[in-house]
Each structure stands twice: as structure tokens, then as C-alpha cells.
């Protein structure tokens, strides 16, 4: 279990670009946490689709320094995250796009959704992947059409009586509540 009495807020600064990353750790020594960032960068360089931490944008130039912003002894991860989030917000105001943190630590999911950034990110993500999902669904259906039709036919044959009873019950319910007149369809058209 981590000892949050060692809580620290730190920054990593690229000496070439001025980009900054703000983080927090409960490690006794800041250098141990920085080594983990270096390890993550190394893994990301080998497999760009894998490990993701925005500190890579600061460290990829290989000319960076790390600084302790504040020693912050606390009792829980949540307290440390909230304090980290305070500095991320502060750095985003002061340095703008040079602060590369993509998430504000300590921010709840609901707070993120309320922010404009969260709303637009959700829309972009949904739209970005929509076409891909539709294409995958079409390909899956085309590839497995015969199998799926066979399974559906087998199910209908096996549950023929249950399906018939269900359809009768639905018909009776619609008839009893005069469903057709409520949706403005004349009974002649429905036949």
C-alpha cells in the first residue's frame, strides 16, 4: 500500500519546446516516478498503440528536466489527485497548449462531461468511430449471414409455440387498449 505521506506534485518540462506535464506521486523519491515515465515512453516508442501517457510529448525530445512543485503529504489518493488537478488547471491557464495533460486529475466523470472539452470529445469519438463500427457490423453480417440465419431458423422452430403465444398476447393487448386508434391508423390499413 502506498504511503501518501510522501505525496508530491511535480512537473516535467521539455527544454526544447517548453511543453509541460504535471503529475503526482506517492513514491519516496521523485526520480523513481520519473523512471516509470521513461519506461512508459520506451514502451510507447516500441508500440505506439499501447501504453499512453501524455508525458511522452514532453519527454520524446529527450531534453527535459523534472521539478518538485510541492510536497503534499496526505492520506488518500483522492486528496493527492485533487491537488494535482489544481496545478493542472493553473498550468493550463498560464501556459495554455504547452501544458500537455489531457485529463485533469481529481476531476469526476460528471465534471468532465459538463466541461465543453468533454462534450466535444464525446461527440468526436462517437462520430469518428461510427463509420468504422457500421462497416465492421456489415462485414460481420456478410461473413456470418448463413450461420445467423440458420440459428434464427432453428430458434423459431424450437420455440414455435412460445412465439405464437407471445404474438397472440401482444395482439390481444393492442386490441384491448384500442392501440390502432391511438396511433391514428385505421383498422383497414392495419389489415
Image: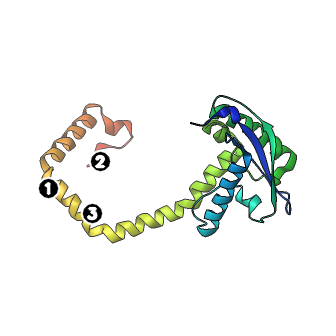
The residue drawn where x is 81% and y is 63% is 63
Whole-percent x, y for residue 109 in the image: 61, 39
Answer with left or right where residue 160 lies relative to residue 23: left
**CA gap, disc 3 and disc 1:** 14 Å
**Element at badge 1?**
helix
For residue 166, which quarter of the picture?
A: top left
The residue drawn where x is 72% and y is 31% is 73
Camera-near label (3 vs 1) is: 3
User: Which of 153/178 is in front?
Assistant: 153
The label number, if any, that marks residue 98 in the structure image: none
User: Which of 49/156 is in front?
Assistant: 49
The residue drawn where x is 71% and y is 36% is 7
| Mark 3 or 1, nearer chain start | 3
123, above or below 177, in the image? below
Whole-percent x, y for residue 139 in the image: 40, 69
Whole-percent x, y for residue 80 in the image: 69, 35
**One can see residue 102 in this view:** no
74, above or below 12, in the image? above
For residue 23, which quarter of the picture?
A: top right
Which residue matches tag 3? 148
**CA gap, disc 3 and disc 2:** 30 Å
User: Which of 109/123 is in front?
Assistant: 109
Camera-near label (2 vs 1) is: 1
**Element at badge 3?**
helix
158, above or below 17, in the image? above
Asked which colour scheme the image uses, the reply is rainbow
Which residue matches tag 1? 157
| Mark 2 or 1, nearer chain start | 1
Amino acid at each position: 500500500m502506498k504511503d501518501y505521506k510522501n505525496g508530491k506534485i511535480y512537473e516535467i518540462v521539455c527544454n526544447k519546446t517548453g511543453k509541460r506535464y504535471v503529475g503526482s506521486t506517492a513514491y519516496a523519491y521523485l526520480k523513481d516516478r520519473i523512471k516509470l515515465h521513461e519506461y512508459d515512453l520506451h514502451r510507447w516508442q516500441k508500440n505506439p498503440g499501447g501504453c499512453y501517457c501524455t508525458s511522452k510529448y514532453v519527454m520524446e525530445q529527450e531534453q527535459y528536466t523534472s521539478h518538485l512543485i510541492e510536497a503534499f503529504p496526505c492520506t488518500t489518493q483522492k486528496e493527492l489527485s485533487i491537488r494535482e488537478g489544481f496545478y493542472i488547471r493553473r498550468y493550463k491557464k498560464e501556459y495554455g497548449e504547452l501544458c500537455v495533460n489531457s485529463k485533469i486529475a481529481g476531476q469526476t466523470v460528471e465534471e468532465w462531461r459538463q466541461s465543453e472539452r468533454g462534450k466535444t470529445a464525446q461527440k468526436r469519438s462517437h462520430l469518428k468511430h461510427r463509420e468504422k463500427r457500421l462497416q465492421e457490423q456489415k462485414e460481420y453480417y456478410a461473413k456470418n449471414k448463413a450461420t445467423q440465419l440458420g440459428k434464427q431458423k432453428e430458434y423459431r422452430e424450437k420455440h414455435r409455440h412460445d412465439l405464437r403465444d407471445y404474438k397472440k398476447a401482444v395482439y390481444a393487448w393492442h386490441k384491448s387498449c384500442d392501440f390502432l386508434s391511438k396511433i391514428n391508423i385505421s383498422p383497414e390499413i392495419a389489415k
